Image (cartoon, grey):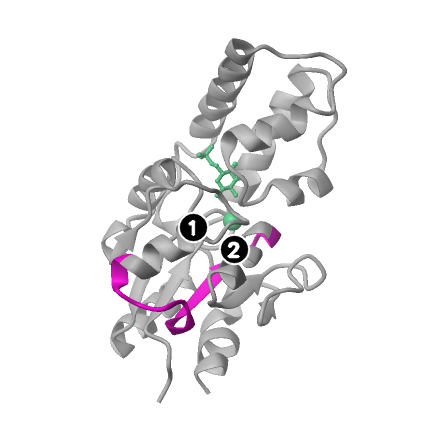
Amino acid sequence: MSCFRACIFDLDGVITDTAHYHFLAWQRLARSVGVEFDLADNDQLKGVGRMESLEFILAKSARVFSDPEKDALAHQKNEDYKELIREISPKDILPGIQEAFDWLKAEGWKIGLASASRNAPQVISSLGIEGVFDYVADAGVIPNGKPAPDIFLDVAEAFGLRGSECIGVEDAAAGVTAIKAAGMTAIGVGGAETLREADVVLPTTEMLLENGLKALVG
Ligand code: BG6
Ligand code: MG
């Protein structure tokens, strides 16, 4: 009998490919302040909150930005991001995710969402999956962002579970670190090198059920 009782999902880059839209919006912002921003830079920002991400990009510039300027840039990035996600629909759920949800429900596990994004409620609503989650963490009230364990611990606490009873699924190095710091088992989706701290790394979500969840349950 498995010791796991819950699966806690990241959203961007795990359930749907919004990680790419975040990249496009950050790249546009970076160019607007004369800074280059490539996919390797973006890898470091996956899972990282909006203002911390902005600071990372602005640190590449020789200019010093005032707080009001930073607020305006963060706002602009979010407007661009919202425009990019405007047409998201259930067909944008990544392969293998719905099968994993169905299996978890059938097995009686809790399903949680631990996304750093303030846009997460809008995205899961557009995907038509808001009813899947037993609990959705509110990124706006979590004290420390990933790689701190806080957001994953918040979900475990809502379920009345210990970290050891939860599996976390992440595409970000910062997210995998957060899962492990919460005492949970980590499934990483993406590159094995970036996600080397994870207990299981899968190249895509297609294998999540068979090679991830079922493999861990044994
Ligand atoms: C994370 C993404 O899920 O949310 C990051 O991986 C993003 O790329 C962060 O910066 C914050 O998102 P938002 O929508 O609140 O700006
Ligand atoms: Mg992610």
Picture quadrant of residue 176: bottom right
Helix, strand or loop for disc 2: helix
Task: Please provide percent x and percent y for residue 79.
Answer: 45, 22
| 176 over 46 or under it: above or below | below
Tell me the distance, in whole angstroms, between the alpha carbons under discs 2 and 1: 8 Å
First of labels 2, 1 by sequence position? 1
Please rate how many residues cluster around mark 2, counting C-alpha atoms within 10 Å: few if below 14, some from 14 to 19, many from 20. Answer: many
Q: Is mark 2 within 8 Å of ligand 2?
A: no
Residue placed most toward the observer, 84 or 196: 196
Magenta region includes residue 139:
no
Q: In this picture, is 164 found above or below 115?
A: below
> Residue 139 appears at what percent x and percent y?
38, 40
* Amino acid type for the residue under numbered disc 1: Asp
Spot occupied by residue 121 in the image (x, y as percentages of width and height) = 31, 41
Residue at 32% of width from left, 37% of height from top? 122
SS of the residue under disc 1: helix
Q: Which residue is mark 2?
A: 178
Q: Nearer the viewer, residue 215 or 156?
A: 156
Label 2 sits on what residue type?
Ala
Few, some or many residues within 10 Å of mark 1 (<14, 14–19, 20+): many
In the drawing, does residue 182 fall left or right of residue 197?
left
Label 1 belongs to which residue? Answer: 150
Q: Position of residue 85 (x, y in %)?
A: 43, 34
Identity of the residue drawn at 26% across and 57% down: 158
Q: Is residue 194 left or right of residue 126?
A: right
**Label ID, residue 12:** none
Q: Residue at x 58, y 50 (%)?
A: 174
Q: Which quadrant would residue 159 be assigned to in this image?
A: bottom left
Is residue 165 within the magenta segment? Answer: yes
Q: Which residues are magenta?
A: 158-173
Quadrant occupied by the N terminus = bottom left
